[in-house]
Amino acid sequence: MTPELTPKRIVIVRFSSLGDILLTTPLVRALKQRFPQCQLDYVTGSRYQELLTANPYIDNLISLQNGAGIPETRKLAARLSTQGNDALIDVHGSLRSLIFRSRSRVPLVLTFKKLRVHRGILIVLKRNIYPDDRSMALRMLDAGRSLGISDDGGGLDFPVDQAVEQRVKRLIDAEIPGNRGGLIGLAPGARHFTKRWLTDRWSELARILVEKHHAAIVVLGGEDDHELGAKVANDLGDRARNYAGRLTLAESAAVLSHCRALITNDTGVLHMAAARQIPVVAIFGPTVRAFGFYPFRVPNRIVERSLYCRPCTTKGSARCPLGHFRCMKEIAPADVLFAYEDLMSSQPKSQ
């Protein structure tokens, strides 16, 4: 298929996870802009389908159940192979997506370059041979370049149904009293330990933000972050609320739209804030910007330490490989506060 031909049906495959799926949304938008009459299907894991439910550029959202194995993946691919797809774009690049696309019987299969060798050399040898420092969103968008799509210069997409927006507004009105012009989101969790800044420093930062900037704090995250969120929020009384584990993905996104900024570890909530056009302060420990997972096209600051041992992983791990955990321990609340204040000082003043 060439750019001169118009596909009638395209399927995109990305099973997980939160941030990675949101980083595919510029590709989704570019395809729909290039082929407005094309049916655009998206296959993802059922756990994450809420990220795409209200996306106006997707015509058909297809979910693979959580915990589904290879047989279920093959069955879904075989079913879709009967629906006349003209092109399949695999932006996952895993064994599961390889099996899926091999069973889909689609005339044109496109993939994106994961740059595994570049990543491995950076982690092991600490040599950066990446050709550029572009976001993963643009690397994924490259997968569709042969279809004639282009980058429109926009950011990530995470639209939310109006009913969700209204429900969240009522929640915030009821639970966070007073002037909320200084509402700040905190995301202290992460799937893996080494991506988490120290809990006591999150608590100290939250206290300073409340006392110095008269902020109100909302803690965001998943069910596994609820206890951590409680440690951060509980000493601040009615100036903080722990929403980690209490909200759906869409509700969390709606909460972020009420925040003037998000302060976060290198985790999926970072990309959720970017998709809602909220300024981000991101704390990077074992990971680095070169991997492509920094805040995409929103005002941001990255807080990190230049150390001989960074990066040591792309996804985080259960413990520091060298035992010292300097990448996080050497970041003080004052460092993150400075980054936040610098970011806010660069933003237009609200009328």
Image (spheres, rainbow, N blue to C red):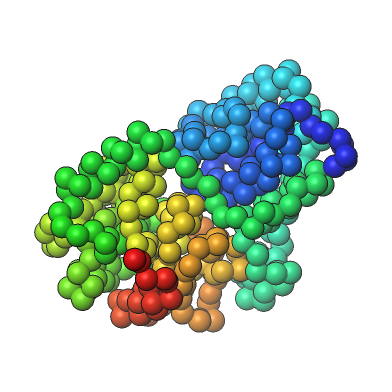
Residue closest to the eye, 36 or 334? 36
Please give the name of the residue rendered at 45% of the width and 62% of the height, measured from the top-left corner: 266
To which quarter of the image does residue 163 belong?
Answer: top left
Q: Is residue 329 visible?
A: no
Of 99 and 256, the residue lying toward us: 256
Of 24 and 45, nearer the camera is 24
Quarter of the image for residue 229 reads bottom left
Q: Position of residue 125 (x, y in %)?
A: 65, 75
Q: Position of residue 230 (x, y in %)?
A: 20, 54
Q: Quadrant of the N terminus?
A: top right
- In percent of width and height, residue 298 lies at 50, 63
Please give left or right for residue 335 compared with residue 86 in the image. left
Q: Nearer the viewer, residue 192 or 282?
A: 282
Q: Position of residue 250 (x, y in %)?
A: 39, 41
The image shows residue 146, relative to residue 306, as above or below, that is: above
Residue 275 horizontal side relative to residue 228, left or right: right
